[in-house]
Amino acid sequence: MAIRASRRQFLKTTAATGIGYWVAGGVQAQQSNSPNERIAMASVGIGGKGSSDSGDAGRHGDMVAICDVDTGRLDGAGNKFDKAKKYTDFRKMLEEMEKSIDAVTVSTPDHVHAPAALMAMRMGKHCFCQKPLTHSIYEARLMGQVAREKGLATQMGNQGTASDGLRRAAALMRAGAIGTVKEVHVWTNRPIWPQGGPRPEPKDPPEHLKWDLWLGPAPKRPYGNGYHPFAWRGWWDFGTGALGDMACHEMNMAHMGLNFHNPISVQAVTSKHNKDSFPKWSVITYEFADDDSRPGVKMVWYDGGKMPNEALFEGQKPSGSSLIVGDKGKINGGQLIGGTDMEVEYPKSPGHFEEWVRAIRGGEPAVSNFPDYASPLTETVLLGNLAVWVAADGEGPKVQWDSKNMKATNIDGLESLVKPQYGEGYTLDV
């Protein structure tokens, strides 16, 4: 089922609110001959967030194949999708089912997002991928490039992008409701999993887990309690820490309102770490250069219970997980503090997953599509982890960043974090 995204009305609507930049250059796809036909869906990862993602896929199309390295989960999902073929290796699924699949959801640990999504997209499959879009900056850039080149309908799973509250707050920023934005503060209470310690003791993996397939492109290591199914987020080889887990949600409002796509430096203070497991907490400061829509701005990220200075909230309690500070007011979790409340227009969403389905069927592109929104957001998010890496002893140097070339200009040795080397059997570049 091929599609062509109808962008004219979308561009007209978003231009009125000043947020049309994320579809600049276009996300064009081929025209469907029958926009009412059923979409043939496949899901890679059907546990955790993959449970709801595959459920959404099944409600909006026909599930023809499901894949998970945990056969217990796979068998459970097989009862729900009784007509779907079951696989434990996404490569085999895509190779055998290529002609039967229109679209793929990817809801795996972070290190498998890009390998699975890139393989699917290179076969011409529309793709929905959970946040963060990728495990590395290079993968995020490449995902956007492949999606654009192939003309595919894509979307990252940062569901808040579809909310009226977030879109209205972003529109208020762009309309000048709080004046010139000077700084942004974003926070999370995570990690809520063990982090910052040694590896678990090696042991045999459970029979229901295909450990080699779970590792996928990552460096080999023995199984241990504390990786599958959730705590993988705290390990550099598999996850992206609290930042990767939450920032594509919590930075989303500022990214939508302020075009956060050109960071020039990043610096971190951490609780220290061993470069194997992420620190228990970190505070990361980003600097963004001027662009056509705003002057330069600073953003500070806090995790592990760290928070902005209480004085910034002017006696109010923190609302949500972000504070946008302008010279005429503030937005505290979507709520104005001072500033000028006003009527603003913004594109309404039919629902986050529904935006992707609409795009597959030839409608407007999803806001959080890969090339124009999700890839730049993910690059910004993951840049913070370069600063965390060089802050292993607590306080790290400022990383000067050349965004165009994806390169730190003042610190050597970060190349493998920017662009990973996949293990045998997995493909990054073609």
Image (spheres, rainbow, N blue to C red):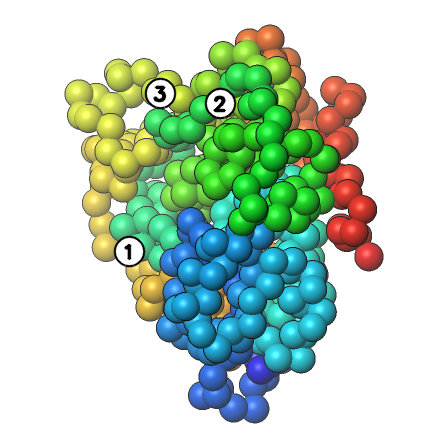
> Could you tell me the amino acid type at mark 2?
Gln
How busy is the neighbourhood of tag 3: few (under 14 within 10 Å), some, or many (20 plus)? Answer: few
Give the mark, 2 or 3, whose residue is nearer the N terminus: 2
Q: In what element is the residue under mark 3?
A: loop
> Could you tell me the amino acid type at mark 1?
Asp
Residue 39 x %, y %:
50, 79
3D distance between C-alphas at marks 1 and 2 = 34 Å
Tag of residue 305 = 3
Using residue 354 as the reference point, say whether residue 35 is left or right of it.
Answer: right
3D distance between C-alphas at marks 2 and 3 = 13 Å
Using residue 132 as the reference point, say whether residue 387 is left or right of it.
Answer: right
Q: In terms of depth relative to the viewer, which is nearer, 90 or 85?
A: 85
Q: Is residue 71 above or below residue 83?
A: above
The residue tagged 1 is: 164
Q: Nearer the viewer, mark 2 or mark 3?
A: 2
Q: In terms of depth relative to the viewer, which is nearer, 146 or 66?
A: 66
Tag of residue 328 = none
Give the quarter of the figure containing the N terminus. bottom right
The residue drawn where x is 38% and y is 29% is 192
Residue 354 x %, y %:
39, 68
Most extreme residue toward the bottom is 33
Give the quarter of the figure containing the C terminus. bottom right
Tag of residue 195 = 2
3D distance between C-alphas at marks 3 and 1 = 28 Å
